Image (cartoon, rainbow, N blue to C red):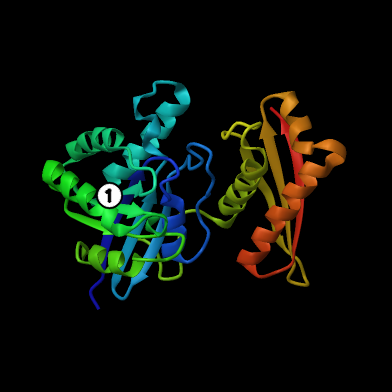
Amino acid sequence: MKYKILKISIVGKTNAGKSTLINQIVGEKISIQNKKINTTQELIIGVKNIKNTQILFYDTPGSNFLKNINNQSKKLKKNLWNGIDESDLILYLVDSSLINMKFLYDQLYKIKETKKNIIICFNKTDLIENKKLLPIISKIDEDHKIESFFTISAKKNIGIDELLRKLVKFSYFSNWIYTDEEITNKDDKFILSELLRETILKYLHKEIPYNIKIITSTYKTLRNSDIKIKQKIYINEKRYKKIILGKNGNMIKKIREDSQKKIKNIFKKRIHLYLELVIK
């Protein structure tokens, strides 16, 4: 059997649903989902194998920061363009319920400089009638000559199969990069760290910066098949420690229990999770 491959960068404004889409496609939670801006900071690859074709999806940081010049934005911008440079095709995701045509056009003008095919996906179409999108799609196509348009709901798994059938047509003969059992370029420790970071942002997104660092220092399968996990939460200011701990330690307990539940749902085993706060 001859193998085929396709590399796709998923680009779009923060909260367009990029991570949700990748998680839905690969069938597992590999990328952090949170409404806080630019929660995806590293280049995470989701792997989807369809018969003889392997599709790699590059989950890029939200593109809101492209005009910013601070150090954090420079890092995010580098990760975004690395994903675009590596890819064969760009999948631009738009939140159908919050369409900003000026922002979208600014982004498209910049991305079209890559000379790569662009597919625009209008996500969250469960929140809007498709007929309202038709004149918008017609206008964008008239101005930019986009390869294809799709309307989907990543959360509700609507339109995903149709999108994948289209994407497979762009694949080309090449050896697979990952095995048929791998679904991401990241290991279990990275995914565990991302799950904890997501949980912290869920409860404390207004109080804690999104660039906190999480390290999974221990991941051990015990004799009874339970999993023992130790994670360190690195913070750069002492005041954050009090916020994460909460009154009488209630917040850190809530974070630990929630994160432990998420991990159990993924690994289908009993989890023993231990958290440690470290001030850098």
Q: Is residue 121 left or right of residue 38?
A: left
Helix, strand or loop for disc 1: loop
Q: Is residue 82 left or right of residue 197?
A: left
Q: Is residue 248 left or right of residue 228?
A: right
Say which amino acid is labelled 1: Ser
Residue at 72% from the left image edge and 29% from the top image edge: 240
Which residue occupies the extreme top position in the image? 69
Measured as percent of width and height from the top left, residue 139 is found at 17, 45
Residue 176 visible in this rendered orientation of the protein: no
Q: Nearest the camera: 63 or 137?
A: 137
Residue at 45% from the left image edge and 64% from the top image edge: 156
Residue 276 visible in this rendered orientation of the protein: yes
- Whether 188 is drawn above or below 164: the answer is above
Question: Where is the N terminus found, in terms of image quarters?
Answer: bottom left
Measured as percent of width and height from the top left, residue 56 is found at 34, 58
Q: Nearest the camera: 30 or 257?
A: 257
Name the quadrant containing residue 268.
Answer: bottom right
Residue at 46% from the left image edge and 42% from the top image edge: 42
- Whether 65 is drawn above or below 199: the answer is above
User: Circle 1 sits on which residue?
Assistant: 87
Name the quadrant containing residue 82.
Answer: top left
Measured as percent of width and height from the top left, residue 187 is found at 54, 55
Label 1: how many residues lie within 10 Å, few (<14), some (14-19) or many (20+)? some
